[in-house]
Amino acid sequence: MDHFLYKDGALFAEDVPVAEIAAAVGTPFYCYSTATLERHFRLFDEALAGMDHLVCYAMKAASNQAILKTLAALGAGMDVVSGGEYARARAAGVPGERIVFSGVGKTRDEMRMALTGGIRQFNVESEPEMVALNAVALELGVKAPITVRVNPDVDAKTHAKIATGKSENKFGIPISRARAVYAEAAAMPGLEVIGIDVHIGSQLTELEPFRQAYEKVAELTEVLRGDGHDIRRLDLGGGLGIPYTRSNEAPPLPTDYGRLIKETLGHLGCEIEIEPGRLVVGNAGILVSGVIYVKSGEGRDFLILDAAMNDLIRPAMYDAHHDIVPLIEPAVGVEPVPYDVVGPVCESGDTFAKGRMLAPLEGGDLVAFRSAGAYGAVMSSEYNTRPLIPEVLVHGHEFAVIRHRPTFDEIINRDTIPEWL
Ligand code: LLP
């Protein structure tokens, strides 16, 4: 459920007509709904009620300061994967003890930054990383709290580019080697082993892969405890999928996911962390775009939008589907027609959808891509020197620009000219 609905034939974000925002900021832009964000965060929090837990929002999905502050105010922790994300989380007022540091290639500088600024734990992904973290911690005279990310060799049944839990993926250490790796970690004086971490992929639409992974984690917890490790925290990653089309069957709800966690791991008495990104922010954001031209091609019509692959790369990168809806609700009985929906960037990959059935549109009309809140703005670029598009946050009757559209001068002035030119 989200708060982007038609009222009297016009698309609203909460209580604000989206066309009003478009008139104020120009298209294209991202628009987020505070109520939807809050609702989705709370669903996770409530799903884990009764267990000692922390929901660490995976801020890679959308990391605007205003989004982080909205979630932090509800008690969210943050899952960060870079020094930049760590800095963003801290700048949004998130205390170090609510930040977990994930990622397969943390640098020593990033480790230093987190150890000095405060960190809940590092999710360590390899032995060389353990060695580096131990060295940095000793140099700073502290102990780094760690979990080790295990790769449970489970098929997440999602798009290959976002599956992470099979043995061929670069993530974590093979679960079969966990005992040896934990023994090594325990022997390093700069590390404090506190738990286990697992994350098997993103946009999972079934619970079964989670069940398989979590059962393996439960078993491993007992084994490692038997080896004398004080396993008291389990980080279960993110990955719960969202519906990208209105018609497809609904993926499992956070409540079902919470129940599964209790069933598989509840008996262990561990503190539970989860790292959802997409489900918190995905359906809390839309991308609003204007139609520049409708061009008749050979046997097809192209809807040429002012948004492009540099603004929303998911269709080009993962063949992802995003529902596209007009800002003005089509009248009853209007027959949809097929469009190839494209952007202005100079490559054929800049195609959002082929043969998409939409009510007839013309130049100047406005449309919205739904479910664009996660991995939308954060994956955008300035390819073709197209400025990063603004982000807007709606809150009831109010809206605010939370990232402005840079001017061409701002973009150009980031370049510096060497002396010899
Ligand atoms: N934790 C870790 C360690 C992760 O790698 C990820 C996502 C998450 C949590 C959050 O997963 P989520 O709840 O959002 O599924 N750009 C791709 C998705 C990449 C996901 C990367 N890792 C896309 O647009 O589909």
Image (spheres, rainbow, N blue to C red):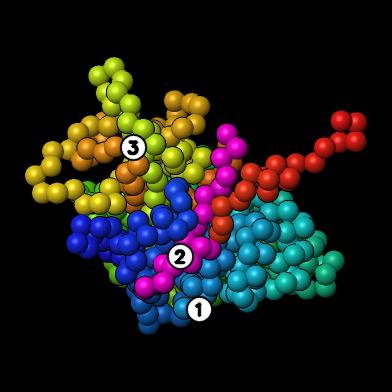
Instruction: Give the labeled residue for mark 3.
Output: 363
Instruction: Give the labeled residue for mark 1.
Output: 73
Quadrant that contains the C terminus: top right
Q: Is residue 309 above or below residue 249?
A: above
Residue drawn at x 33%, y 26% is 295
Q: Position of residue 172 (x, y in %)?
A: 57, 51
Q: Give amino acid for label 1.
A: Ala
Q: Secondary structure at mark 1?
A: loop
Comparing labels 3 and 2, the label whose residue is closer to the camera: 3
Query: Which sits earlier in the primary sequence, circle 3 or circle 2?
Result: 3
Query: Most extreme residue toward the right, as rendered?
Result: 420
Asked if residue 392 is among those painted magenta in the image, a careful observer would answer: yes
Instruction: Give the labeled residue for mark 2.
Output: 393
Q: Which residues are magenta?
A: 384-402
Residue drawn at x 22%, y 63% is 7
Q: CA distance from mark 3 to mark 1?
A: 42 Å
Q: Is residue 29 left or right of residue 397?
A: right
Comparing labels 1 and 2, the label whose residue is closer to the camera: 2
Please name whichever residue, 373 or 9, is drawn nearer the observer in this view of the structure. 9
Q: Secondary structure at mark 2?
A: strand
Residue drawn at x 53%, y 45% is 380
